[in-house]
């Protein structure tokens, strides 16, 4: 498979990892849009949130709780942060491996894009 995020999860491509367990890996975005911009992905290849299956329910919940933990560790939880998941072409998804952007450290404006 030629998926850049699978390669990062498999340590074939270097990244700055901020969290890792058996199912999830989180790393700094190489093109940050905020002072804190971390990508949180499942190690299992799921092409998008729309492609997630009922058997992924527990993994999806773990991802969200992991994002919460990382936000606290990064010192952005109290002031606030944004979690973004782009799904599909019109949703702005450019890497076809489900991922969540954790953004913080500055005011997040709305509408977002």
Image (cartoon, helix red, strand yellow):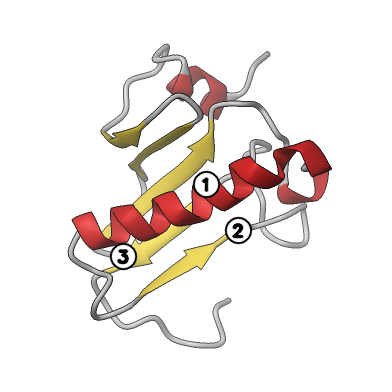
Query: Which badge, 2 or 3, comes first in the chain's sequence?
Result: 3
Please identify the quarter of the rendering in which residue 1 is found: top right
Please identify the quarter of the rendering in which residue 104 is found: bottom left
Q: Position of residue 95 (x, y in %)?
A: 62, 39
Task: Give me the disc on residue 13.
Answer: none
Q: Residue at x 28, y 71 (%)?
A: 77
SS for tag 1? helix
Q: Nearer the viewer, mark 1 or mark 2?
A: 1
Q: Is residue 104 above or below residue 5?
A: below
Task: Give me the disc on residue 62.
Answer: 1
Q: Position of residue 35 (x, y in %)?
A: 23, 63
Query: Which badge, 1 or 3, comes first in the chain's sequence?
Result: 3
In the rendered image, which quarter contains the C terminus?
bottom right
Q: Nearer the viewer, mark 1 or mark 3?
A: 1
Tell me how many marks there are: 3
Report the front residue among 51 and 90: 51
Please identify the quarter of the rendering in which residue 21 is found: top left
The span from disc 1 to disc 3 (Cα, nearest Å) is 24 Å
Report the residue that reaches farthest toward the bottom.
Answer: 110
Q: Residue at x 24, y 81 (%)?
A: 79
Task: Give me the disc on residue 85.
Answer: 2
Judging by the rendered image, the residue that carries numbered circle 3 is 34
From the viewer's perspective, tell me whether residue 2 is left or right of residue 110: right
The span from disc 2 to disc 3 (Cα, nearest Å) is 16 Å
Q: Residue at x 58, y 52 (%)?
A: 61
The span from disc 1 to disc 2 (Cα, nearest Å) is 15 Å
From the viewer's perspective, tell me whether residue 87 is left or right of residue 69: right
Report the front residue among 81 and 67: 67
SS for tag 3? loop
Query: Which badge, 1 or 2, comes first in the chain's sequence?
Result: 1
Q: Is residue 95 above or below residue 80?
A: above
Q: Residue at x 77, y 43 (%)?
A: 52
């Amino acid at each position: 498979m030629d998926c850049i995020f699978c390669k990062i999860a498999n340590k074939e491509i270097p990244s700055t990892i901020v969290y890792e367990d058996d199912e999830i890996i989180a790393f700094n975005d190489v093109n940050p849009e905020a002072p804190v911009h971390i990508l949180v992905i499942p190690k299992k290849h799921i092409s998008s949130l729309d492609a997630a299956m009922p058997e992924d329910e527990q993994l999806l919940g773990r991802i969200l709780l992991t994002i919460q933990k990382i936000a606290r560790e990064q010192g952005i939880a109290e002031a606030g942060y944004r979690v973004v998941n782009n799904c599909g072409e019109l949703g702005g998804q450019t890497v076809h491996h489900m991922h969540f952007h954790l953004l913080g450290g500055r005011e997040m404006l709305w509408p977002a894009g």
